[in-house]
Amino acid sequence: MMVQAVLEPMPHFPGSFIPLRGGDGNGAGMPVPWQRRNETRWYLELEPWSGDIHGLPTGLVCSVAHPQGLRRIQGHMPYSDLTEWIHALTRLGHEAEALALNTALQSHLESPAVLRWGAGQRFSLDFSRPRIMGILNLTPDSFSGDGVAHNVAEAVAKGIAMAHAGADVIDVGGESTRPGAMQVALEEELSRVIPVIAELARRLAIPISVDTTKPEVMEAALEAGAGMVNDVSALGGADGDERTALDQRKVALLKDLDLPICLMHRQGTPGTMQNDPHYQDVLWDIYRFLDRRIGECCSGGIDKKRLLADVGFGFGKRAGDNLALMWHQRMFLGLGVPLLFGISRKRITGLLCGAVNPESRDTASHILAVFGMLTGARMFRVHDVAGARQAMVTAWEWMNDEAHLNH
């Protein structure tokens, strides 16, 4: 079993948030804790551990956290002690453990990417600031009640309105992935999304994302002008989940293209995913999957700099699983790719705010999106673009521009 390490920064701030600072003058953003490393404590977990359980650094303990009896090291360490221990592990012959910890640490310390792509670098996303992805559902059965099916003019008008409201990306999908939804036939999905993507790509200067699991739809959408791929199967089989192998047709299609790809985790498929979701350890299970899938994509020729990750709130998760993923999202920064946060109008949002109707959950969705920004997410997939934009800008100004607000 390969050694795996996860790190979660636990800085000394009022409350439990991690504000993100803006640019350093060169377009690179950097989270506050990593500018003040001496004040940061890191929570770490390392598995499996085969070394001595005695003489561990202060703050670390050894536990059995696996059905096969594998031992895990876990606990808190200041940044300086963590780097010192990594060097000590190498000297003591624990090269695999040292490498796993160092890889996770370096991924955390990377500056957010400024992603430019397309002919003549047409598109740009600077992930040192939060970015908004507007949801354009072209389905008759969207859980959120906002689906626009088979009305190209209405769908295009809605997409344009999202762009004017401040969306950085428009995410176009023609197949519902709500719990209980059944798969849509290929020709039906194509007929829903391709005309709309083609028209939006012609009329807007921002990238149009295609939200699909089918390689045939991806290919047609890219030919129609789509500039991003959002795949809830993480480039696995269209009708598969976390257990499904990487779909080599998708890899062959995307590996040489200069565009972003979002990989999402889901347990089960929409038709069954909420029947009885279960995890051995929800954080580790999802981290391992996304880390492995990112590695598989890179081995297949897809540049890691083009990847985003999404933990998949509501996709085969119980309420407690979703809450754990929200609280501990910082650990997923160790994947070394920008994080997409997609919780808009979902059931967990309704459970927290008490709103039964998904269309009444926008305020709660914006609050959670700000929480997601404070804990490291870079892109936010939302239904209400104007409201989300206002919430994000307000929180960002509060965190970053307090000086000019006094004038």
Image: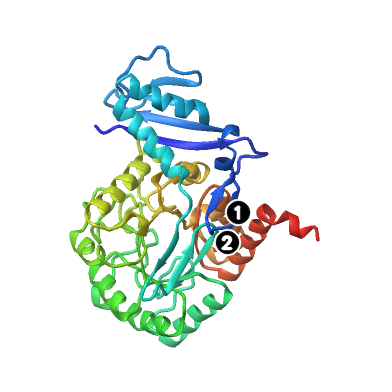
Residue 88 placed where, x, y %? 39, 22
Q: Mark 1 and mark 2: span between their CA atoms?
A: 8 Å
Query: Can residue 351 be spotted in the picture?
Result: no
Residue 91 sits above or below residue 347 on the image = above
> Disc 1 or 2, which lies upstream in sequence?
1
Q: Residue at x 24, y 73 (%)?
A: 186
Specify the farthest residue to the right: 407
Amino acid type assigned to the residue bearing label 1 in the image: Cys
Query: Which residue bears the numbered disc 2?
Result: 361
| Residue 296, x across and y down, in percent | 25, 50
| For residue 140, side relative to residue 223 (left or right) | right
Q: Residue furthest top?
A: 54
Against 210, residue 86 (above or below) is above
Residue located at (18% from left, 59% from top): 248
- In terms of secondary structure, where does tag 1 sit? helix
Is residue 290 something that shows in the picture? Answer: yes
Residue closest to the far bottom:
153
Q: Quadrant of the N terminus?
A: top left
Query: In which quadrant of the rendered view does residue 33 lie?
Result: top right
Residue at coordinates 47% horizontally, 85% vertically from top-left?
154
**Circle 1 is placed at which residue position?**
353
The answer to whether the residue labelled 1 contacts the one labelled 2, judged by CB atoms less than 8 Å apart, is yes
Residue situated in front as seen by the camera: 242 or 221: 221
Horizontal and vertical percent position of residue 77:
51, 27
